[in-house]
Amino acid sequence: MSQAASQLAPKERLRVAVHAADSPRRVALGRVVAEAGHIVVGIGDTADVVLADGDGPPGETRPVVTLGGADEDLAGVLPRDADASQIDAAIRAVAAGLIVRLPGTREREAGFGAMRESEAHALLTPRELEVLAALAEGMTNKAIARRLDISLHTVKFHVESLFRKLGARTRTEAVAKASERRRRETITL
């Protein structure tokens, strides 16, 4: 073994709960997780990450990597046919607090730029509205996380989403654009 190879730290073993509606898919995904060197645990057990086939378990608070799911609010979103190396990389990244999307997905194309005109009037979620109100008060991400009882990572995710939906680059610009949008969309009777 070379000296450089011996200095590399071994890969961390994570506890991964596998959520799938049908048993054969759950077993197959469990095998992928185990072959990547992780520990497969039950969905009700303590886990670092949940790997879900399709949409994640309702009300899940742990980081979730979904395969083919439609919930873009989850930390990791991969196509249903993701390979073992992509799944392992996503599990590790999500456990480290990162957001995972494959290149070419809508999230990646949109980046932090303004949305296309057809999407410009996308509705803000209730949580995004709460974060926006806190931004308008001049609160820091840390203070917002405390007030809303969510993680700092989740606050950053919502702020990024607000920037994208409102076509803003700063917090002040996001508040100003939301205020202008509200004035335009208010119907006077």
Image (spheres, rainbow, N blue to C red):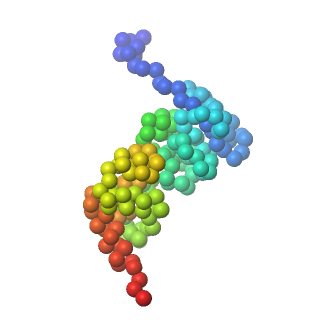
Relative to the observer, which residue lies in front, 9 or 57? 57
Among the 4 quarters of the image, the one containing residue 64: top right
Residue reaching furthest to the right: 23
Q: Is residue 124 left or right of residue 114?
A: right
Residue 124 x, y percent position in the rendering: 44, 64
Q: Does residue 46 appear left or right of residue 152 in this picture?
A: right
Residue 167: tell me if it is visible: no
The quadrant of the image that shows the N terminus is top left
Q: Residue at x 48, y 46 (%)?
A: 75
Residue 73 in the image: x percent, y percent? Answer: 49, 53
Left or right: 57 in relation to 78: right
Outermost residue toward the bottom in this view: 189
Q: Nearer the viewer, residue 164 or 124?
A: 124
Q: Is residue 62 above or below residue 11?
A: below
Residue 28 percent coordinates (x, y): 66, 36
In terms of depth relative to the viewer, which is nearer, 30 or 45? 45
Q: Looking at the picture, does residue 147 appear above or below residue 123? A: above
Q: Residue at x 36, y 58 (%)?
A: 134
Can you say whether 71 is above or below 177 in the image?
above
